[in-house]
Image: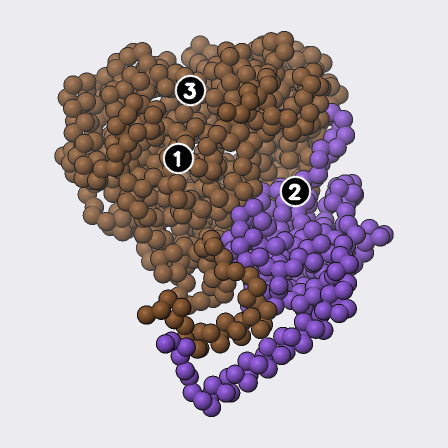
Chain colours: A purple, B brown
Amino acid sequence: MARYGMVTDLRRCVGCHACTVACNAEWDVPAGQARTEVRATPIAGTFPALASSVFVSQCNQCDRPPCVNACPSGATRQTASGIVSVDKRVCIGCGFCVEACPYDARHLDRQTRQVDKCDFCLSRVERGQEPVCVATCTAHAKYFGDLEDRSSVVSRMVFENGARRIETGEVAVGPNVYYAGLPEQLDLVAATFPPRHPRMPASATVWRRAFKPLMLTAIGVAFAGQAVAFFTQLKNGEKDFED
Amino acid sequence: MSTESISRRQFLGTVAAAGAGAAVAPAAAEARPHPPGWRGDERVEQIATICEMCFWRCGVLASVADGHVVRLEGNPDHPLTRGRLCARGNAGTGLLYDPDRLKYPMLRTGKRGEGQFKRISWDEALDFLAAKLKAIKDAHGPEATAFFPHGIGSRFFGTLMSAYGTPNSAEPSFAQCRGPRDVGYALTFGQPLGSPEPVDLESSKLIVLIGSHLGENVFTSQITAFANGLAGGARIIAVDPRFSTAAAKADWWLPIRPGTDIALLLAWMHVLIGEQLYDRDYVAQYASGFDQLAAHVKAFTPEWAEGITELPAAQIRETARSMGAAKPAVAIHPGRHVTWYGDDTQRARAMAILTALLGSWGRKGGIFLPTSVPRGSFDLPSFPDSARGRADGVGTRFPLASEELGVTNGLVDATMTGDPYPIKAWIVYGQNVLESIPQRHRTLKAIEALDLLVVVDVLPVEQTNYADLVLPEATYLERYDPPVVVTTAKQPFMSIRQPVCEPMYESKPGWWIAKQLASRMGLEAWFPWNTPDEHLDRIIEPMGINGRALRSRGAVAFAGRPYIEDRTEDDGFIPTSSGKIQLYSEELKDAGADPLPRYTEVEPPPAGYVRLIYGRAPMHSFARTQNNEALHALMSENEVWLHTATAGEHRLADGDRIVLENTDGGRSRPVRVKVTEGIRRDCAYLVHGFGQGGRGLRRAFGRGASDTALMSRVKVDPLTGGTGMRVNFVRPVPAEPAV
C-alpha cells in the first residue's frame, strides 16, 4: 500500500502563492480561506546579518492524526494510504478537529459551514493526477509521491537528502509533509512554525466517548427509518401532501 | 396553489439527508464557481490561450462548461511555461467575473474626474469617436491625437492610429520600465534584450541581481529557471537596499546605498581586470575598446567604491572574485523596471560591459541569444507620413529613445506645453496613465488641456473618471489578439490568444472596436479581413503553420540557437556596426555622452526624510489586480517598510497607521508601518499598485498607499527620456483621523 507524502523544497520556493490560489480555485475554497498557505518567517537578526525563509503550510496527513480522534461524527477519516480526508456528507461542522489540529491546517468553510482541509487532492490522485499545488508550482518546489517506494522522488528527498518534517519532542504525530532546504533554514522554519498541543475540548472527549456511538446509532436509525419509509412507499404508492 | 406545496418524494429526500447528518449546513448563499466533480466531466471543454494577468504571456488552459469558465490552469503544451501558472494566472476568472467591470460604453456628463457618465450604445460611441477624431484631424492635423497603448491587444489600435496618420504612440514599457536597459544593451551588443529576458538562470553558477527582486517579482518561467538554477547549485549576489526574498536566498546580500550601483559595477570591473579574472579569450575575440575600459576603471578601486556604496571593500573584492571563478556561467540579471535615477542607460551599459568581461553573452549560464523566426505578416497599405514628426522627443530631445515604444512623458510634456505642437486627444488602451507615469499632477494637467480623452479598459480604474468616452473592453479570456512570436526563449515560439467564452455585458474585443472605427473613418483598407480566424490564417499561412494544431495547443515552437556554439559565421550574434561588442561606445561619444559609464553623485535624502523605493508583490501585477477577489484576499493593502531605527526616530511601532509625505508636501493615503531590520535606514519601501483612486473598484479603492502619487519628482535620462523614479524622499506623518 502506498504511503503518500509531500516534500516542499524551501530552497526553491519563492513564496509566489500560486499553490494557494490554484488550490482555492480547484476546490472552491472561499477567498480569504485556504487549504494551503504561504507564509514567511519574520526577518531575524540585525542589519545586515539577517535571515528569513518562506514556508508553505498544509495538512500534514499525520500518521496519528488528532483530528480523527476529535471528530464526533466520523467525517474525518484516514485512508489506507495515509491521507486524512473529510467526508462532507457526514461532517456536522462542530469544529473540534480544527481545535485539535497541531498545525492549524483545518478551517470551517464560511460558505458550507463544514470543515475543509488539504487531502493531497485525493480525487485527483485517484485519477492519476498530481495535487494542483504540485502541478502549478512555478518554482517546481513541491513534490508528491509514495514514501514507501524508495525510488520515488519524495522518498529520495526524505531518506537520502535530509528533508525534514516539522515536529517537536512534545508534539510528534507523524506528519507526512516534509521540507527540504538548508539546515539553518529548516531550523528557522521549525522554530517559527512549531506544532501546538492538540486542543481537545472536554466536550470533544465526551462526544467521542458517549455521543459518538449515540450519533452513529441515530444515523443508523435514520437510515432504517428511511428504508422503512421507502418500502412502505413502494407498497402504498406515492401520495402528495398537496391539498 | 399553496406555496408550501411539496411532493412526498422531496420531503422524503430531505428527511434522508438529515438522517445522514449532512443537512446541518444551510445552502451556501454565495454561488460557487463550479460543482465538485466537474473535473473529468465530458461537458467541460479545454481551450488554450495566453494569460494577461501580467505581460509575460504564459500559456493558459481554460476549462469551460456551458460557456462558463470554471478553471484556469497552466497549458502543458506551452513551450515556455509548460503547465505552470502563478497566483495571478490562477486567479484570472476573478477578472472575468469581477462585478465591478466596465459594462457598457459611457459618455461623460459631469466634470473631468467626477465620474458622472451616461450609458450610450456602441453605435453612438463609435459614431461620436469617429467624428471627434476626424474633427481633430481636420483642425489640428492627425499628430494632435496621441495613443497610449499597452499589451498585444493594442496592436489593432496601433494600426488604426498609424493609418489615421499620427506617429505619437508611447508605452510605459519604455520610459517607465525597460527602455534605458534595452538601449544600454543594444549600444553594447547590437541588440536589445527584449521580453521575456533571455537570462540563462537555470544553467547559471552565479546569479547577480542588481535591484531585481525575483520571487516577489514573479514571472512563471523566470521563477522556474531561477529555482532550477538554485537547485543546480547557483550562488546568488543580491544587490538591494532591502532584504528581499531573493536576498534571503543569497550567498551575498549587498545592501547598497541607493543610486550608487554604477560605482559598485566599476569596482567589480576594476577587480576583474586588475586581477586578470575576466574572460581574456572571449574579450580578445569578440569585444572592442578593452584598453580604454581598462584605463577607465583603473582608479575605481573597491576602497573608492566603499566610500560611495557603503559596502565593505573586502565584500566587493570577494564578490568580484566569485564572478571571475564562475565565469562564463554568470547571469548578470539586466532587470526590467530600470528607470531609477536618470543615469539608467549608463548603469545598463555598465551591466552589459560586466557581462561581456565575464564572457557571459551567448554562453550557457549567462545571457542566451534570441533566435529569429518568421513573424508572419500580411501586406497592408503603407501608412501616411507625418509632416510634423513626433511630439514625444524620440530622436530629438531623447536621441536614443525607441521609435517603436515612444516616450509617454514626452507626450505629457507636449500636451501640457503645446510644444512642438498642440496635442488635443489621447486614446488610452490597456495602460493606466495615472498609475504608470510618475508626476501625476502633470499628467492631470495635460488631461485638462485635452479636447478628448478616450479610455479603453476592462475595469473602472481612476483614469476612467477623467475620460470623455469610456469603452468597455473584453478581458483577455473573451477576445482574440494578434499572435505573439517570442524569440527570446531557448525554444522560440508562436502562441495565440483566443476567446474561451463570450464577452460579458456589452464589452467588446479590441480588434472589433478598432475595425468598427476604421470602417467609420474610411480606413478599412488597413483591416482587410472579416474575422479573427481569417486574420490569424493570413498570418500563419506563409509560415506553414497548421492552424488547427496552433489553435488546439495554443503554441508552436521552433528550434532555437541560444548559444554561441550554435551559431555559424553568417548567423552572427553581435549585430553592432563593427560586429564587435562595444565596451567603449563611439555612439555614446557621438551623442555627447560618456562612452564609458561613470558614477555621478546621487542626492542624499534631506534631514528627516528617507528615499522612497518600491517594488512588487508576487500576487499582484502593477495596479491591475488589486480588485481581484482571490488576490485581494491574499494582499488587500500594502505596508511601508521602515528600518527599526527610522521607525524609532518617529516613535512608530509595527502596525501603526501613518501617512507618507514627500518633500513637495504630497501625501499618501494611510498605510501601515512594517518595522524591520530588513531595509536600510535611509529608505522606505512600498509595493506598487495600491492606494487606488477609482471608486468603482469596490475592493481596491483607497486601500494602502500609492508610490506613484508620491513621485512628484523625476530625474529624466537625457538619452532615452526614461523617468528616474527613485528620487523622491518621504517622511511618516500622523494619519489624519478617519472621516
Whether B287 is drawn above or below A216: the answer is above
- Between the residue at mark 1 and the residue at mark 3, the CA separation in whole angstroms equals 20 Å
**Residue at image point 64% right, 35% down:** B245
Q: Which residue is mark 1?
A: B696
Observer-nearest of B169 and B624: B624
**Quadrant of the drawing holding the N terminus of chain B:** bottom left
- Between the residue at mark 2 and the residue at mark 1, the CA separation in whole angstroms equals 31 Å
Relative image position of residue B252 (x, y in whole percent): 71, 30
Question: Are dots 2 and 1 in contact, CB under 8 Å?
Answer: no
Labels 1, 3: one chain:
yes
Choose mark 1 or mark 3, whichever is in front.
1
For label 1, the crowd category at 10 Å Cα-Cα, with few meaning under 14, some 14 to 19 and many 20 or more, is many
User: Looking at the picture, which amino acid does disc 3 mark?
Assistant: Arg
Q: Which mark is residue A39?
A: 2
User: Looking at the picture, which amino acid does disc 2 mark?
Assistant: Arg
Labels 3, 2: one chain:
no
Q: Which mark is residue B378?
A: none
Is residue B364 among what the camera can see?
A: no
Q: Is disc 1 placed on a helix, strand or loop?
A: loop
**Residue at image point 63% right, 45% down:** A38
